[in-house]
Image: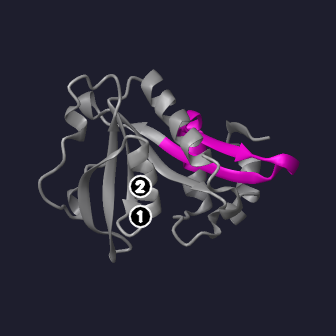
Amino acid sequence: MTTIRRFCCNDLLRFAPVNFDHLTETFNMSFYMTYLARWPDYFHVAEGPGNRIMGYIMGKVEGQGESWHGHVTAVTVASEYRRQQLAKKLMHLLEDISEKDKAYFVDLFVRASNMPAIKMYEKLGYVIYRRVLRYYSGEEDGLDMRKALSQDVEKKSVIPFKRPITPDELEYD
């Protein structure tokens, strides 16, 4: 049985095996601690039998006005727990929290080469909003994918951008 609960400090010492996937972005401890302190509602872990960490989602809420949105910073599931719709459950949880916070959309970045993830996000209702050139380590392009929430009645947040952008053109709040 899987339990999804809020991420806690002790999880930082137990979640390394989930990050072994080469497509998973990893961060330093202070980065994770900042998210845990500032956006605890957006940081969850999926735990399996024996308290084994199966996956996690880390996000935040940011922006102003119609740019107020939930952001998926990382979602990852250990390879042995994939194909069980765990990432889908974690994504829906972050979307629901974003809805409660009256966000207009949820966005995320994904490597342009990560077709399995792109297909999964598309099945969840995300669209490619724009391409960010050399987003990952200055080498690989990233795709900014978005899903409009109920606050965005006219779905303005998901109208695709006409041209690729560079990382320095991104707006950070």
38 relative position to 164: left or right: right
Q: Where residue 11 sits in the image (x, y, percent)?
A: 73, 51
Would you say residue 167 is visible in this rendering? no
Would you say residue 35 is visible in this rendering? yes
Labelled pair 2, 1 in contact (Cβ < 8 Å): yes
Determine the residue positioned at 71% across, 53% down.
54
Compared with residue 84, is residue 19 higher up or lower down, i.e. above or below? below
Compared with residue 80, is residue 73 higher up or lower down, i.e. above or below? above
Residue that badge 2 annotates: 119
Q: Residue most toward the left?
A: 162
Q: In the rendered structure, does residue 48 fall within the stretch colored magenta?
A: yes
Q: Where residue 32 sits in the image (x, y, percent)?
A: 59, 53
152 relative position to 87: left or right: left
Determine the residue positioned at 19% across, 47% down.
160
The magenta region covers 33-59
Quadrant showing the C terminus:
top left
State the SS at label 1: helix
The amino acid type found where label 2 is placed reads: Lys
The amino acid type found where label 1 is placed reads: Met
Give the Cα separation between the discs numbered 2 and 1. 6 Å
Q: In which quarter of the image is residue 166?
A: bottom left
Q: In which quarter of the image is residue 65?
A: top left
Residue that badge 1 annotates: 115
